[in-house]
Image: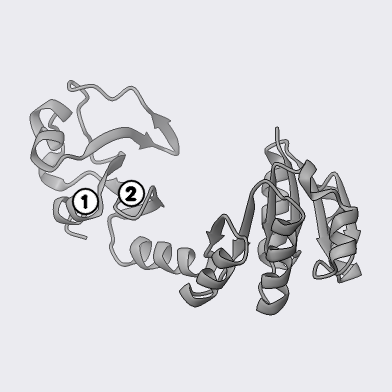
Amino acid sequence: MKAFLLIGLGRFGKSIAIQLHQLGHQVMAVDHREELVNDILPFVTSAQIGDSTNMDFLASLGVKNYDVCIVAIGSDFQSSLETTANLKELGARLVVSRAARDAQAKFLLRNGADDILYPEKQFAKWTAIRYGSNHIFDYIEVDSDHAIFEVSVPRDWVGHSVGQIDIRKRFNINIMATKHDGKMDVSVTPSTVLTEDRTMLVLGEYKALQKCFHI
């Protein structure tokens, strides 16, 4: 369990708060809008109404006591930038800030952010990949070069074993698991036979995945 300071309770911030709550983490939520603070109360450990650009207010929160400080402000970049800088000046351990584009990310990183969140950009990429092909069902970015795709079993692979296809040798791609009726099976071996009613979770480089599955 970790302690989070979450600043900014718009749709994105609220979603983060709910997910952290479901995972059992402690969350202090902050926003200057009273209605948003009241709305998030059932999902967080505590919440406060306040201006995160005010150094005295931030200091009163004891930012050094949190494992992660997330700046999820999306509508006012100046406030996001000032909040990020103030958190770092007050000794925050890890500051993660939201950005809409690369130029914002550069300013945030120069002013104290340790990492950047791109909710719109990341979701746009997921949407393009997910719906740009009929045989891709999910996508997780691992890093700038690697990803995990959930894909249907290619027609000419049906009825063959993982060993017979030898995807690792041919494309340097690993089949991590298969799914059937929403249930995941991670016990994939060379003798596992692929069927058309299953999907596969495959890990590899983007270029290799695109070539192998004609993305």
Residue at 37 percent of width and 53 percent of height: 137
Q: Is residue 205 left or right of residue 7?
A: left
Q: Is residue 57 above or below residue 153?
A: below
Residue 44 % position (x, y): 82, 47
Residue type at the position of mark 1: Leu
Regarding mark 2 in the picture, which secondary structure is present there?
strand
Residue at 64 percent of width and 48 percent of height: 94
How many numbered marks does the figure carry? 2
State the CA–CA distance, disc 1 to disc 2.
8 Å
Which colour style is shown? Answer: one colour
Q: Nearer the viewer, residue 189 or 61?
A: 61
What residue does disc 2 label?
147
Label 1–label 2 contact, CB within 8 A: yes
- Residue 38 visible in the displayed image: no
Residue at 81 percent of width and 66 percent of height: 52
Sequence-first tag of 1 and 2: 2
Q: Nearer the viewer, residue 67 or 159?
A: 67
Residue 87 % position (x, y): 73, 58
User: Looking at the rendering, in which quadrant would you find the N terminus?
Assistant: top right
What residue does disc 1 label?
209
Q: Is residue 198 above or below residue 30?
A: above
Residue at 37 percent of width and 50 percent of height: 143
Residue type at the position of mark 2: Ala
Q: Is residue 191 left or right of residue 92?
A: left
